[in-house]
Amino acid sequence: MPVDRRPPAIFLMGPTASGKTALACALRQRFPLDLVSVDSALVYRGMDVGTAKPDAATLARHPHALVDIRDPAEAYSAADFRDDATAAMRRIGEAGRVPLLVGGTGLYFRALQRGLSSLPQADPDVRARLAAQAAEAGWDAMHRRLAALDPAAACRIRPGDRQRLQRALEVIELTGRPLSEQQRGDGAVTFPWRVLKLALLPGDRTVLHARIASRFDAMLAGGLLDEVAALRGRGDLHPDLPAMRAVGYRQAWEHLDGRYGLAELRERGIFATRQLAKRQLTWLRAEPDARALDPDAPDLQRRAEDALALFLGPAS
């Protein structure tokens, strides 16, 4: 049996509020690891409270690559992440250390390891026609159409996420194939690293829900509304930007627009975060070769350390 001589890498994956950052930092204290963030919101500067970004002291002690690398007015794609993460992993390897990629953005993990398919360019005529149909029938009806054509994509895309919903329907119309099928990548390129995947999967989802509620309350107390008000005050941001569609930010923006009060903001923010966690858990359970760890188990850190020690070998 041939020996796999690719350098090692660790993927630490889990739903929001599952304790990924704390575990990653604890593992870095024992092993020669450097951290790479896999989070579509942490890339943005000035979005600290609502993203639960590690504080300055934590980042000083345990630096994370790919945190604070974009302005909220800028787009950041899975392809951008793949390029940036690959470069960061190579730098870490050249320094004689092992990359530990930590986060909950499944699309980024998938793009990094399996690549991205070549999707068609946007077609203005198709987009205009879909927008007209949505204006007449409503976006809920468009989501039902997507569910009939591509159930996997419909599970990931919320009816209110108009941009992604429109894009999914556009790709299907242009190619005749489901978006989810095309996003799997062609698998033709071997990933340059051998990977240990650790997935934090709660045994009791009610505990995760309680932690989500507690963390959202802490965000409100810690200045989420002030943070979003400052972002609004720039004048160059709007609710349809990818950064402002992040969970918590959209709800805070709508509250500041006067659409609903503080109590409803809290309710909507917690609900949206729980829905995000549900989608992340669905993806994680289908992720091949992932070793499941209960984030609430008292021996979580020991079990993770044992897995890393076995994977990295005596040199660790």
Image (cartoon, grey):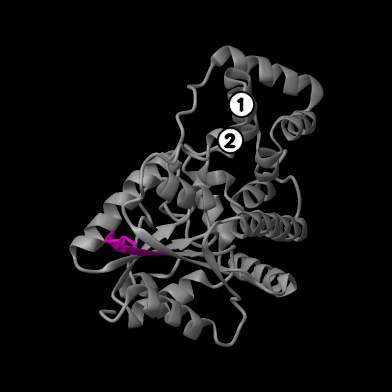
Q: How many marks?
A: 2
Q: Which residue is mark 1?
A: 177
Residue 241 colored in magenta in the image: no
Q: Residue furthest front?
A: 1
Seen from the viewer's position, the closer of residues 99 and 164 is 99
Looking at the rendered image, the quarter that the C terminus falls into is: bottom left
Residue 129, percent from left and from top: 67, 15
Please determine whether, in this image, residue 297 is positioned above or below residue 15. below
Estimate how packed mark 1 is, as few (under 14), some (14 to 19) or many (20 or more) residues with alpha carbons within 10 Å: few
Q: Where does the magenta region start and end?
A: 1-10
> Is label 2 in a helix, a strand or a loop?
helix
Residue 304, percent from left and from top: 47, 78
Q: Residue at x 61, y 71 (%)?
A: 218
Residue 5 colored in magenta in the image: yes
Seen from the viewer's position, the closer of residues 148 and 164 is 148
Determine the CA span between mark 2 and mark 1. 7 Å
> Is label 1 in a helix, a strand or a loop?
loop
- Image quadrant of residue 315? bottom left
Is any part of residue 76 visible from this angle?
no
Looking at the rendered image, the quarter that the N terminus falls into is: bottom left
Q: Which residue is mark 2?
A: 181
Seen from the viewer's position, the closer of residues 84 and 139 is 84
Q: Residue at x 41, y 59 (%)?
A: 37
Q: Is residue 211 left or right of residue 91?
A: right
Q: Are marks 2 and 1 in contact (CB under 8 Å)?
A: yes
